Structures are given as structure tokens and as C-alpha cells.
């Protein structure tokens, strides 16, 4: 874990810095709220989420991966694949099962109570990438542990995937206007800012699409892909939460009576 803090932290920090600089130089969508106002809120939410990730989710993932390795548990181990093939398949299967988890967070009412905190941001940029309720990350520990155990992922590949997931999350949440031809080329394989922006749309049908995290082909496979919505006209957020929410309100949101997210006030 100490080594991951160094190399994994460098990968994630590098992605955040590059995306933050790029989205200010080449913004994709106009802002609806002042950046300083949102950064003050998002920074505190990100800090709490980062602590939960480092102190709960990652240690649990490594512990489960180590236990599974010792016990010889997991589909990929039972197939007795060569190490390189097993590592590639592990990465792909982790990403597919994260797609499933993301979709469940929208479909299961209890999980959505926590996940909607992420969607209440009224703009979308790299600061939104890690604006998750700590409770959502704690709930994900069981799912991520089950992923690792069932697939048969070793600790090293599990941490590599985690670093890639966080870097990809920073990239596709960013407000970075890539050249359209480049974005279309990248989107054949990866989730891009235009694609994920649609997932944060105020329109329910668009929000319920584009659940992929790293590889975009899971949405093609499950027929949940939505493209072609002009980024400049996209409204971000949820219809029922059009006023900025402070940190205390965001932390309390899963535990209080909620308005239906797609029913305007």
C-alpha cells in the first residue's frame, strides 16, 4: 500500500492536474455557477471520499485479493491462464463489474440515495470526479471485494486497476474540449468527456445511459450508450436540486426525506 501511495498517487494527481489545466484552457461547456463556490464544496467532499478510499476501500481490496490468492479462489485462477492473459482479463472484468455497480447505483433506490450526491453538482468538471458521499464508497467495499474474489484478482493488478479507474474518472468528468475527431476516435475505446457529460444531464433518459467507467464498449454491449447530445446545450444536474448544496446538506442528503430527483420543484 505504501508503494501504491507513491506511484498510484502520482498517476491520479497527474491526471487531475492535466485535466484541470486543459479544461480551463479549452472548456467544453459554459459554467452555470462560480468556480470558487463549487471548489469550496467539492474540495471538502473529495477529502472525505479520499480518506474513505484510502482507509477502507483499498485496504479491504488488498486484503481480499491476498486472501483469494492464498486460497486459490477465483475464475481466472481456476482457468490456469498465463500471467499476462490473466492480468488483462482481470482488468477487463473489473471494469465490466464496475459498470454493473454504477448501473445498480442508479437503479437500486437505497444506493441512489447516496449516489445522487454526485449528480447534484450543477456543473461538471474534474472537481466533480471525486465528489462522492463517503457512505457510497463504504457501501462499495462489499461489491469491490466480491469482484476481486470472484474474478481471482491478485493485489498488484487490483491496485493497477484502481489507479487507472481514478485517472479515467478525472478525465471523463473534466470539462476538457478535445478536438471532435480525436474525441470520436478515443470514444471507440474509452469514456470521454462528451460521452460522460451526457450521463450528468438533467434529462432522466440521458442520465440513465453511459454507465461505463474506463472502456466505453460496455455501454455498446448493454445498449445503454447515448451520444450526439450537443455539449454546449447540455444542462447538468438533477431537476429537483437546482440550488447549490453545501457540504452539511450533501452529507445529510442520503438520510433525510428526498424529493424525486427528476421531479422539478
Image: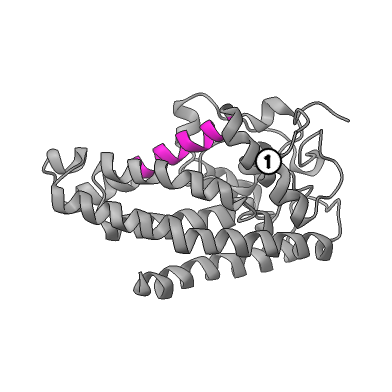
Q: Nearer the viewer, residue 187 or 105?
A: 105
Image quadrant in which the C terminus is located: top right
The quadrant in which residue 38 appears is: bottom right
Which x, y percent locates residue 89? 27, 44
Which x, y percent locates residue 37? 83, 62
Residue 213: within the magenta?
Answer: no
The answer to whether residue 168 is left or right of residue 31 is left
The answer to whether residue 180 is left or right of residue 247 is left
169 shown above or below 14? above
Q: Residue furthest front?
A: 256
Q: Name the residue that disc number 1 marks.
A: 255
Residue at image position (69%, 64%) is 43
Which x, y percent locates residue 218? 45, 34
What colour scheme was applied to this rendering of the protein?
Answer: one colour
Residue at image position (75%, 60%) is 41
Residue 104: within the magenta?
Answer: yes
Which contiguous range is marked in magenta? 93-106
Q: Secondary structure at mark 1?
A: helix
Residue 219 visible from this viewpoint: yes
Q: Is disc 1 surrounded by few (<14), some (14 to 19) or many (20+) residues within 10 Å?
A: few
Q: Main secondary structure of the magenta part?
A: helix
Image quadrant in which the N terminus is located: bottom left
Amino acid at each position: 500500500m505504501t508503494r501504491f501511495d507513491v506511484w498510484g498517487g502520482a498517476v491520479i494527481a497527474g491526471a487531475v492536474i492535466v485535466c484541470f489545466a486543459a479544461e480551463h484552457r479549452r472548456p467544453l461547456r459554459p459554467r452555470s455557477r462560480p468556480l470558487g463556490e463549487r471548489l469550496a464544496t467539492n474540495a471538502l467532499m473529495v477529502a472525505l471520499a479520499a480518506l474513505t478510499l484510502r482507509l477502507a476501500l483499498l485496504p479491504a481490496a488488498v486484503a481480499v485479493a491476498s486472501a483469494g490468492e492464498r486460497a486459490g479462489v477465483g475464475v481466472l485462477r481456476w482457468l490456469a491462464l498465463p500471467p499476462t492473459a490473466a492480468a488483462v482479463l482481470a482488468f477487463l472484468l473489473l471494469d465490466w463489474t464496475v459498470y454493473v455497480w454504477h448501473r445498480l447505483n442508479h437503479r437500486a433506490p437505497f444506493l441512489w440515495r447516496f449516489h445522487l450526491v454526485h449528480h447534484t453538482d450543477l456543473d461538471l468538471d474534474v472537481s466533480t470526479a471525486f465528489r462522492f458521499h463517503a457512505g457510497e464508497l463504504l457501501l462499495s467495499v462489499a461489491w469491490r471485494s466480491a469482484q476481486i474474489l470472484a474474478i481471482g484478482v491478485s493485489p498488484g493488478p487490483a491496485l493497477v486497476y484502481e489507479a487507472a479507474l481514478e485517472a479515467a474518472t478525472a478525465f471523463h468528468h473534466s470539462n476538457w474540449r478535445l478536438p471532435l475527431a480525436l474525441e470520436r476516435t478515443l470514444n471507440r475505446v474509452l469514456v470521454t468527456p462528451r460521452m460522460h457529460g451526457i450521463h450528468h444531464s438533467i434529462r432522466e433518459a440521458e442520465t440513465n445511459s453511459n454507465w461505463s467507467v474506463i472502456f466505453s464498449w460496455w455501454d455498446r454491449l448493454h445498449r445503454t450508450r447515448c451520444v450526439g447530445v450537443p455539449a454546449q446545450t447540455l444542462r447538468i444536474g438533477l431537476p429537483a436540486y437546482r440550488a447549490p448544496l453545501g457540504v452539511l446538506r450533501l452529507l445529510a442528503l442520503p438520510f433525510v426525506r428526498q424529493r424525486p430527483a427528476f421531479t422539478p420543484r
